[in-house]
Amino acid sequence: MSTYVYGIARADHPNLPEAMGGVGDPAQPVRALKQGKLIALVSDAPDNLRPKRRDLLAHQNVLAEAGAAGPVLPMRFGGVSTDDDQVKSVLAEREQHYLERLDALDGKVEYNLKASHDEEAVLHQVLAEDPELRTLSEANRAAGGGTYEQKLRLGERVVAAVQLREAKDATLVQQALEGTSETVNIGPESTGWLANVSFLVKQDKADEFVAAVGALQKEQPQLIIQIHGPLPPYSFVE
């Protein structure tokens, strides 16, 4: 049977509760597969595994329970290997690398931050910062909205100004928070977000980091910030 992998830890990592269940219905028992100085937290992989809510939560719960007892290199959902021997082979082959990453992530958690713009607030901001654009907007309003060409010209100028502000604010978000984190990982770009950044934060600095996010939100009211964490450090594991 195929083997489902949740994460990797040192061989002396405290045991999970005996009744800990993982993915599958019924939940597959989670076990520790030892190889040298490492263990892999695994279970039998259910047939036709899909990212259903129940299985996603089970994966997260295993990592949360294990991570509370010490550093774990988390695998993303869906990590399936051929069998236990294949998992042990990878542990043996990359033992030193995994041990180094466990040392680097010990006592640290991930916070993922996504930021977007409040459209009305950022519009007021770009008009306030650009006198020429503000004059053009006021002239159009005084003329009852202006001609089609005037509206088009104003719209193009506003879009360009907002896009420039998005780029500036993406940099601002990272710079404002990287001082309270160990390192950062820029996530993939996606529609709707001007910034998608993961921060690796020491557990004893978590309150300081969250407070810095709150301060940033107050100082930059044009931003809408969503913060997720603390999380296993998915973004900092190869």
Image (cartoon, rainbow, N blue to C red):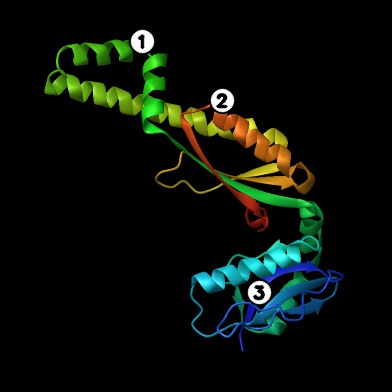
Residue 56 screen position, x and y as percent = 55, 69
Q: Amino acid at mark 3?
A: Val
Question: Looking at the picture, how far across and down is residue 32, in whole percent?
Answer: 76, 78
Which label's residue is closer to the chain start, 2 or 3? 3
- Which residue appears at 70% of the width and 33% of the height? 179
**Vertical side of 126 occupied by 118: above or below:** below
* Mark sitting earlier along the chain (1/2): 1
Q: Quadrant of residue 164?
A: top left
State whether residue 89 is above or below residue 127: below
Please determine whether, in this image, residue 1 is positioned above or below residue 105.
below
Which residue is nearer to you in this view: 133 or 2?
A: 133
Q: Which residue is mark 3?
A: 5
Residue 69 is left or right of residue 238, and the answer is right
Q: Identify the element where label 3 is drawn.
A: strand
Q: How many marks?
A: 3
Q: Position of residue 54 (x, y in %)?
A: 53, 73
* Residue type, mark 2 in image: Glu
**Picture residue at 72% right of the left edge, 67% below the top:** 65
Residue at which label 2 appears: 219
In the picture of the structure, the residue carrying the numbered disc 1 is 131
Residue 104 position within the rendered picture, expressed as x and y whole percent measured from the top left:
79, 52
Mark 1 or mark 2: which is in front? Answer: 2
Tag nearer the camera, 2 or 3: 2
Q: Under tag 1, what secondary structure? A: helix
**Dot placed on the residue nearer the N-terminal end, 1 or 3:** 3
Cα–Cα gap, marks 2 and 3? 43 Å
